[in-house]
Image: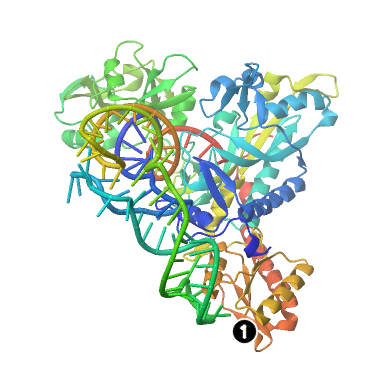
RNA sequence: CGGGAAGUAGCUCAGUCAGGUUAGAGUGCACGGUUCGGGACCGUGAGGUCGGCGGUUCGAAUCCGCCCUUCCCGACCA
């Protein structure tokens, strides 16, 4: 490809306050935004996307996946049958066709796969199967952000496993677990696997594959000592021992101006974890029904784990309550607790650690007052008890007791053990050897292609621009001619020779100053630059330079061979790096819990 | 959806507080010339419903109201 004919050039500037990786993808002419969270891929970006897709295909095929294609537009009816029409909020984009029928833009394809299975799988002989496609998804996210990090329209590689039992599901799950690590390694992105939330996909066990970076929007909890790793949404710290001190009688105590945990702790001269903190939320427990006040009770030094709270009360949606909503239920902000609220005013969920502690301090629902000697089981027997406190840095690991650490990351893919929820609601069954019908056991596995691209850009750039791995770069070689005349002809000849040798070349043939070409080459991040100039030509040589390496010259006559050799070296180095990343996989699989079977 | 900010040339932004000639810069684009190994220089030129609608005013990019769009921070996910 000639730069002179390329659709989409580079830009000198990009909007401020965007992620660096996003700015570079914009400036390099890889992507362009059309609307919030909706992007076009320009030719260079598209080629990189295709490279990533190729890696996905190879790894999916390798584990026995069969590529296919499923529709983007689904009848709403199908989603009503699995309940997701009601259980998913506005993230699911709904509309009607000309006949007034409900339709949805797919945000994943569990329904369609299960529906396909009803007619394409009938016997245990038709199992196991793994199908996948790489296709557009739409999720009307409340807030798209960070360029490709979080878009509304995006490409996902989603695969689905169909098995007769949990043992089969476990095999497919482990195969994907390994493949996802391989894919990231091949794309040049270091990732870790963490326990994840099964969320709207339903199901039981889930892992997420995360690129660790401070700009990530996920919070992960790690134990350096035993390797426990989980998204904070599902992370659990070790539970404290149950208190054994005798229950004391409740006693109101005046705490003027003490509306925060810190103030109460200091005013009563006690530690924060001796306080039962109440956090108020409003939850939509059933679609279309009025929202309900939900009070979460955690120890004073803990934060509420919203995902866990949401799962505990099976909420469709949940958000922090406003002061007005708290007051409407009879609560006094700053001094609130579920204790003493009118019967049924709120759904109360207490953290297990609160249940185990005795004689805590909590709000009196009266301005300026708290209560000593609060005991959950005695004073609030109706409260639900669950693990709704978030595991934070420094808390003891549930597996080994070592202090946990917290980091940020970008989730590029995840895997779910679905079980039989979808197959049961859509009637996807198979017949076993004895003629009995059973629901098919399903798994689902997703990778965000654009998000992976964002991770690649985040990992591979410097102040000059992108520095892409050969495995995903839009072209292998960036040929640059400096000057016209003989140089131009020599460059043309080399361009043809490189292409004839089967190499993918971006040829900057524009009649512009060398500095412009070099700056653009650096910005686009193609791994190998080849320069033909009067200076090199005078000695019958051309220059080879890796994106971040030192230039060297090679004889003009051997240029094609030298370029091929250099590309092989780059490829070998990347493969070596990937092997290093993957060396730990067997141990990781060994110590990772994948469920029974 | 809550909080904050912004919409002016293809792009990045001044100008708006304090209303008043023909609305600016840099960059990009076109043409000419000089250059030719790190976004070089000189000249000429094209390019704008100042996000939209309404209001105030002799007069609105500027003040007021409503709406739309976009970004950032929170609550949600590949």
In-front residue for pair A155/A186: A155
For the residue labelled by badge 1, is the local secondary structure a helix, a strand or a loop? helix
The chain letter for the residue carrying disc 1 is A
Q: How is the image coloured?
A: rainbow
- Which residue is found at the position 66% from the left and 35% from the top? A444
Q: Position of residue A452 (x, y in %)?
A: 58, 49
Spot the residue most to the top.
A343
Q: How many marks?
A: 1
In the image, residue A592 sits, relative to residue A82, either above or below, namely: below
Compared across the picture, whether A235 is left or right of A538 comes to left
Quadrant holding the N terminus of chain A: bottom right
Can residue A542 be seen from the camera position used here? yes
Q: Which residue is mark 1?
A: A534
Spot the residue most to the bottom.
A539
In the image, residue A577 sits, relative to residue A130, either above or below, namely: below
Q: Position of residue A325 (x, y in %)?
A: 31, 20
Quadrant holding the C terminus of chain A: top right
The image quarter containing residue A10 is bottom right
Give the crowd class for mark 1: few <14, some 14-19, many >=20 residues within 10 Å: some
Q: Position of residue A419 (x, y in %)?
A: 66, 28
Can residue A213 be seen from the camera position used here? no
Q: Position of residue A3 (x, y in %)?
A: 63, 64
In the image, residue A101 sits, relative to residue A243, either above or below, namely: above
- Which residue is found at the position 72% from the left and 39% from the top? A132
In-front residue for pair A32/A146: A32
Compared across the picture, whether A385 is left or right of A525 comes to left
In the image, residue B14 sits, relative to residue A172, either above or below, namely: below
- Which residue is found at the position 63% from the left and 59% from the top? A6
- Which residue is found at the position 57% from the left and 42% from the top? A208
């Amino acid at each position: 490809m000639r730069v002179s004919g390329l659709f989409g050039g580079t830009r000198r500037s990009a909007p401020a306050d965007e992620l660096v990786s996003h700015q570079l993808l914009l400036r390099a002419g890889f992507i362009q935004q059309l609307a919030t969270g909706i992007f076009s891929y320009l030719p260079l970006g598209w080629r990189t996307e295709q490279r990533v897709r190729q890696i996905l295909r190879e790894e999916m095929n390798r584990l026995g996946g069969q590529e296919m294609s499923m529709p983007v537009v689904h009848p709403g009816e199908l989603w009503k049958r699995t309940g997701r029409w009601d259980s998913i909020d506005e993230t699911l984009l709904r509309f009607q066709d000309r006949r007034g029928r409900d339709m949805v833009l797919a945000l994943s394809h569990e329904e369609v796969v299960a529906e396909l299975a009803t007619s394409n799988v009938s016997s245990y002989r038709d199992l196991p199967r793994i199908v996948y496609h790489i296709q557009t998804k739409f999720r009307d996210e409340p807030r798209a952000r960070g360029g490709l990090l979080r878009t509304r329209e995006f490409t996902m590689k989603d695969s689905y496993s169909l098995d007769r039992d949990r043992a089969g599901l476990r095999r497919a799950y482990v195969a994907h677990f390994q493949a996802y690590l391989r894919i990231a390694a091949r794309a040049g992105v270091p990732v870790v696997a963490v326990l994840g939330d099964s969320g709207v996909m339903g199901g039981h066990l889930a892992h997420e594959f995360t690129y660790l970076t401070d700009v990530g929007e996920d919070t992960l909890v790690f134990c350096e000592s035993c390797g426990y790793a989980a998204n904070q949404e599902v992370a659990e710290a070790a539970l404290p021992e149950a208190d054994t001190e005798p229950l004391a009688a409740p006693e109101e105590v005046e705490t003027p101006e003490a509306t925060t945990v810190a103030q109460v702790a200091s005013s009563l001269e006690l530690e924060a974890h001796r306080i039962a903190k109440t956090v108020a939320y409003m939850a939509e427990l059933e679609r279309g029904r009025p929202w309900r006040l939900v009070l979460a009770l955690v120890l004073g030094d803990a934060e509420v784990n919203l995902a866990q709270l949401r799962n505990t009360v099976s909420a469709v949606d949940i958000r922090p309550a406003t002061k007005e909503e708290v007051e409407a239920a009879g609560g006094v902000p700053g001094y609130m607790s579920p204790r003493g609220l009118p019967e049924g005013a709120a759904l109360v969920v207490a953290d297990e650690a609160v249940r185990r502690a005795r004689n805590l301090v909590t709000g009196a629902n009266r301005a300026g007052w708290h209560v000593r000697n609060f005991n959950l089981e005695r004073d609030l027997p109706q409260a639900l008890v669950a693990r709704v406190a978030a595991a934070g840095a420094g808390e003891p690991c549930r597996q080994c007791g070592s202090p946990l650490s917290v980091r940020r990351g970008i989730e590029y893919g995840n895997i779910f053990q679905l079980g039989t929820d979808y197959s049961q609601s859509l009637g996807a069954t198979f017949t076993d050897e004895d003629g009995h019908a059973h629901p098919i056991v399903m798994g689902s596995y997703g990778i965000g292609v654009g998000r992976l691209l964002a991770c690649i850009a985040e990992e591979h750039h410097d102040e000059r621009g992108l520095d892409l791995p050969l495995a995903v770069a839009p072209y292998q070689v960036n040929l640059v001619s400096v000057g016209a005349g003989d140089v131009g002809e020599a460059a043309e000849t080399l361009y043809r020779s490189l292409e004839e040798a089967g190499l993918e070349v971006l040829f900057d043939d524009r009649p512009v100053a060398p500095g412009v070409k070099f700056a653009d080459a650096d910005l686009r991040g193609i791994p190998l630059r080849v320069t033909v100039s009067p200076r090199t030509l005078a000695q019958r040589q051309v220059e080879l330079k890796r994106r971040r390496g030192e230039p060297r010259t090679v004889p003009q006559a051997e240029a094609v061979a030298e370029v091929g050799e250099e590309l092989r070296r780059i490829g070998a180095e990347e493969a070596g790096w990937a092997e290093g990343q993957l060396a730990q996989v067997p141990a990781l699989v060994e110590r990772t819990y994948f469920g029974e079977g």
